[in-house]
């Protein structure tokens, strides 16, 4: 069965000049429900694969106001639900307040993230001057999905199977106007969700914990020396790790209302390790080399040490916010160029007794979007699965393949999607009888511009060099996306599984 559940009218002109609205970025208008009884499957879907792979992404509906950034598009979830050797694909827009308002108006009502000065609305981030498109992150918690935008947004809850919007959590109003930011983390053992938000007014950051019952159980302000722009959060079994990085709005210009992101390479990075249910007074701060971090692989405790691993840049780049130069699209592409920004795998070790930080690279490859198995989040682990990118500067954001890091042996495996094929963030699906950390499957979505179609790939997580076990041909070509999540079959309804 391939059923078109809904079709949204796109108002984007066919001659739209933004390179981020064509080819791999071309938006979809249809929302499907499709089963593998009707979809082409190359290979065989494993019968012990049970759960839902869901990927978020930006799918612009209306002609943009001014400069279009690829993070401006309306959020759309793509989900593949596996059970008993079969699969069902669904895609749905995340119908935020902003989406519904523009749907009613039939046009864009917000400018993009690079031109907040064009908006007359007041307020911070994507809950004010920017539209909350909820197109960046997605994760499963308490039997529901949460979809958000990275610059903080409302707690958009959705059904993990149908992808329909659900009533917001009651604590949505408590954390307003900042909301929550990508990238919140879930401890599958306790069912707790840890998150942060940030603002241009004091307090510049808040930190919170949500229980397995979807109730806010902890929410405290964090004392920072000024306005910051953090992107990720780390957790261990007992701590959370907050980021105070020197890639920030120039404070002197910000006082004049101008937002220019600047890397202050003479300012140390700071990492605040806070007990999971602690307060600002309990934080132990560590200094490290000036850097910027988009995404962490994982964090864990090792004796007196707290270890944090992920992808780091010592040469970060972002296009200017505010009045744009004529070459804005080139500047956006440059900011995504992983060869230029040089993101590599890195380890920070914080000694809780001595206060000392040690740090160093874990590999020479330019890589990002690192993920680990849900079962190992916050715990000592061995494998990180990352994306690798096109070396072509004009295609710098194209996820052209995968790399698996064995952090115990110091080795890697790679897989290339092939010419004209661009992937998504992968996730690891471990069956109920899994023993080893990499027992299971690696799942991702790929758009193939040679065939003008998209596929869901299922690979053996223990050996990427074998290539796909199965490829499910999707009913439409999907736009490239951001982050993804895996919802174990036993946790779809929110139960804790021991």
Image: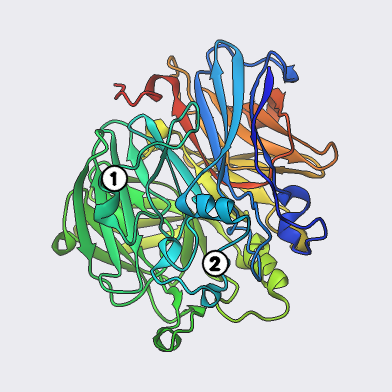
SS class, disc 1: strand
Give the mark count. 2
Q: Which mark is residue 471?
A: none
* Mark 2, other Cα within 10 Å: few <14 / some 14–19 / many ≥20: many
Within 10 angstroms of label 1, few (less than 14), some, or many (20 or more) residues? Answer: many
Name which residue lies at 43% across and 89% down: 256
> Which of the 4 quarters of the picture holds residue 426?
top right
**In front: 338, or 144?**
144
N-terminal-most mark, 1 or 2: 2
Tell me what residue is drawn at x 45 percent, y 18 percent: 434
x%, y% of residue 312?
A: 50, 60
- Residue hosting label 2: 113
The percent position of residue 143, horizontal first and vertical second, equals 36, 29
Kindly indicate whether the residue at mark 2 contacts the one at mark 1 (C-beta within 8 angstroms): no
Q: Is residue 129 placed above or below 259 in the rendered structure?
A: above
Closer-to-camera residue (347/40) = 40
- Which x, y percent locates residue 185? 36, 44
Which residue lies under the disc numbered 1? 301
Q: Is residue 192 left or right of residue 15?
A: left
Residue found 44% across the figure and 75% down from its top: 248
Give the quadrant of residue 476.
top right
Indicate the secondary structure of the residue bearing disc 2.
Answer: loop
């Amino acid at each position: 069965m391939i059923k078109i559940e809904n079709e949204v009218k796109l108002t984007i002109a066919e001659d739209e000049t933004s390179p981020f609205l064509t080819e791999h970025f071309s938006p979809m208008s249809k929302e499907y429900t499709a089963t593998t009884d009707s979809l082409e499957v190359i290979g065989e879907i494993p019968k012990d694969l049970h759960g839902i792979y869901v990927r978020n992404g930006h799918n612009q509906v209306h002609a943009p106001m001014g400069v279009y950034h690829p993070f401006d598009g309306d959020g759309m979830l793509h989900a593949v639900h596996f059970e008993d050797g079969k699969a069902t694909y669904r895609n749905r827009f995340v119908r935020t307040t902003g989406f519904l308002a523009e749907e009613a108006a039939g046009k864009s009502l917000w400018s993009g993230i690079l031109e907040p000065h064009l908006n007359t609305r007041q307020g911070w981030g994507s809950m004010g001057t920017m539209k909350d498109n909820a197109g960046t992150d997605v994760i499963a918690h308490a039997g529901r999905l949460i979809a958000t935008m990275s610059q903080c947004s409302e707690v958009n809850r959705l059904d993990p199977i149908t992808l329909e919007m659900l009533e917001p959590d009651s604590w949505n109003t408590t954390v307003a106007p900042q909301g929550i930011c990508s990238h919140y983390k879930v401890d599958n053992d306790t069912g707790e969700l840890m998150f942060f938000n940030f603002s241009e007014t004091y307090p510049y950051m808040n930190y919170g914990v949500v229980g397995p019952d979807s109730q806010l159980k902890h929410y405290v302000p964090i004392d920072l020396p000024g306005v910051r722009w953090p992107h990720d959060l780390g957790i261990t079994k007992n701590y959370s790790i907050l980021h105070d990085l020197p890639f920030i709005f120039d404070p002197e210009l910000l006082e004049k209302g101008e937002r220019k992101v600047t890397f202050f390479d003479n300012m140390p990075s700071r990492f605040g390790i806070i007990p999971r249910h602690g307060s600002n007074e309990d934080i132990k701060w560590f200094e490290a080399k000036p850097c910027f971090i988009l995404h962490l692989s994982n964090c864990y405790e090792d004796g007196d040490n707290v270890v944090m691993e992920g992808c780091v840049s010592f040469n970060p780049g972002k296009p200017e916010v505010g009045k744009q130069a004529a070459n804005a699209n080139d500047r956006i592409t440059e900011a995504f160029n992983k060869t230029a920004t040089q993101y590599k795998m890195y380890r920070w070790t914080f000694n809780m007794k001595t206060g000392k930080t040690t740090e160093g690279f874990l590999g020479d490859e330019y890589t990002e979007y690192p993920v680990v198995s849900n079962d190992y989040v916050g715990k000592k682990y061995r494998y990180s699965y990352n994306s690798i990118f096109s070396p072509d500067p004009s295609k710098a954001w194209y996820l052209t393949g995968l790399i698996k890091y064995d952090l115990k042996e110091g080795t890697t495996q790679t897989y290339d999607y092939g010419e004209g094929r661009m992937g998504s963030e992968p996730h690891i699906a471990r069956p109920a009888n899994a023993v080893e950390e990499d027992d299971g499957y690696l799942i991702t979505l790929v758009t193939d511009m040679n065939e003008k179609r998209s596929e869901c790939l299922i690979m053996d997580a223990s050996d990427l060099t074998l290539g796909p076990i199965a490829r499910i041909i999707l009913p439409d070509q999907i736009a490239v996306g951001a982050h993804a999540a895996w919802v174990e079959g036993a946790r779809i309804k929110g139960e804790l599984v021991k």
